[in-house]
Image: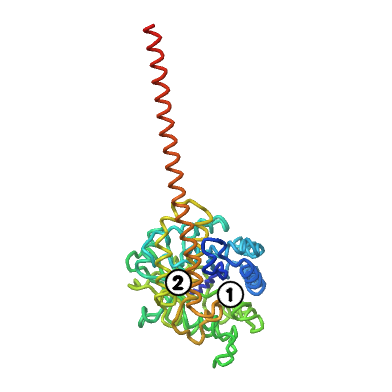
Amino acid sequence: MKKTLCFYFQVHQPVRLRKYRFFDIGVRHDYFDEYVNASTIKRIAANCYLPMNNLLLDLISQYGENFKVSFSISGSAIEQFEMHAPEVMESFRKLAATGCVEFIAETYGHSLASLSDSDEFESQVRYHAEKMKELFGKYPVTMRNSSLIYSDEIGRRVADMGFECMLTDGAKHVLGWKSPDYVYTNAINPRLKLLLKNSRLSDDITLRFSDRNWDEWPLTSEKFAYWLDQESRESDVVNLFMNYETFGEYQPASSGIFDFMRNLPKAVFSMTDFEFLTPSETVKKHQPVAPLHVPYPMSWSDEEKDITGWLGNELQNEAFEELFKIKDKVAKTDDYSLIRDYRRLQASDHFYYMRTKLFSDSDFHRYVSPYDTPYEAFINYMNVLSDFIARVENASSGKSERKEQVAEKKLNGKKTVKKTKNVKKDKVDKEIKE
């Protein structure tokens, strides 16, 4: 039986906040830097999304159903593509039409909602899944959480929503001696199959590809195919999970990253016994070998593969608690602009900018923070959140006042009718007596 090579690409862009000062609270409600957002999307579209999507279309045209990949695209990225680069969405639709690409569900706002005790996680996943069906014609059966955050309990919630497969990281502190190159199951609900990222081989592409100090530089398609063959001697599947912006953004075109990807299928087919499958196809083909026990949340971020990059200090925890404290009030407002802003404020990026832990030498996140310090990120975010909370409170109280006014009007109307009827009855009685 052939081995399986499963490619998954994460596409996410946060809606970036503008500098929002204390004196803006209660005065301005435009939290997002539309100029920076537009220019960023257009730049990355030109460097990554459009050329890489075209490359994948060429590979599918060349190899047909023998070449397959998968994507998850966050809701915030979709909104910005539709606004600033509609040609990107059109290119994803073309990929979907080939039947060789699987689109995966996630939290709509690239949120940390799975770490809260609210039902916001389920709400966002269902909303995103419906969006995938609307855009690409199929309701997803595979789920991935923001930054592949996963635990036994998160997996149970995903299984309860009806998903068949979930992606996460093959963290060493969880796997121990076990290999990430097999299919596993959720420890609570074995109906949910798990695919684990092969971090070493994925990171060879995403982090080390253009590093001239790396003892394996330069990385060629043939060399990588040889590594795949060696990796799969006693395993079923190799999962290569990565940020899509690797191609042309983090690893520039001048590094040869596009040529590497263009030549990789040929090297894989000629040098290995691999076939390319999507996640849902992979879990149908291969039987799980064991449940994976993950009592505490893990992720694909940092060397620790945990959640301390987002919730590792008091600043992050305070912002997280304040944000999810108002979840129910936001939902009750039925105000589209408030719900939209609430999803945008949940993006994990905002919390990552507040991190105070040290970065590893190869961590690309340190290059993308728009703030000079974590404290500056916290202050800016909390200023925005303070104004947002006030808007939610005003909307809630305004709605209550309107309900009271309507109720009072109805009540007064009934009283008036009753009084009118009594007047008419008295008049009739008087006429009868007369």
Q: Can residue 59 be seen in this view?
A: no
Query: Up-down: is 339 above or below 369?
Result: above
Q: Where is residue 278 in the image (x, y as percent from the top left)?
A: 51, 68
Q: CA gap, disc 1 to disc 2?
A: 16 Å
Q: Badges 1 and 2: C-beta atoms under 8 Å apart?
A: no
Tell me the kind of residue under disc 1. Answer: Glu
Q: Residues within 10 Å of mark 2 (few under 14, many from 20)?
A: many
Of 414 and 55, nearer the camera is 414
Residue 212 figure quarter: bottom right
Three-letter amino acid code at the position of disc 2: Leu
Residue positioned 50% across, 64% down in the render:
109
Residue carrying label 1: 245
Q: Which of 227 and 37 is in front in this view?
A: 37
Answer with mark 1 or mark 2, whichever residue precedes in sequence: 2
Answer with left or right where residue 326 lies relative to residue 55.
Answer: left
**What residue would you read off at disc 2?**
148
Q: Which residue is drawn at 60% across and 81% down?
A: 251
Instruction: Give percent across and percent down for residue 68.
Output: 56, 69
x, y (%) of residue 181? 43, 77
- Evaluate whether residue 329 shows in this view: yes
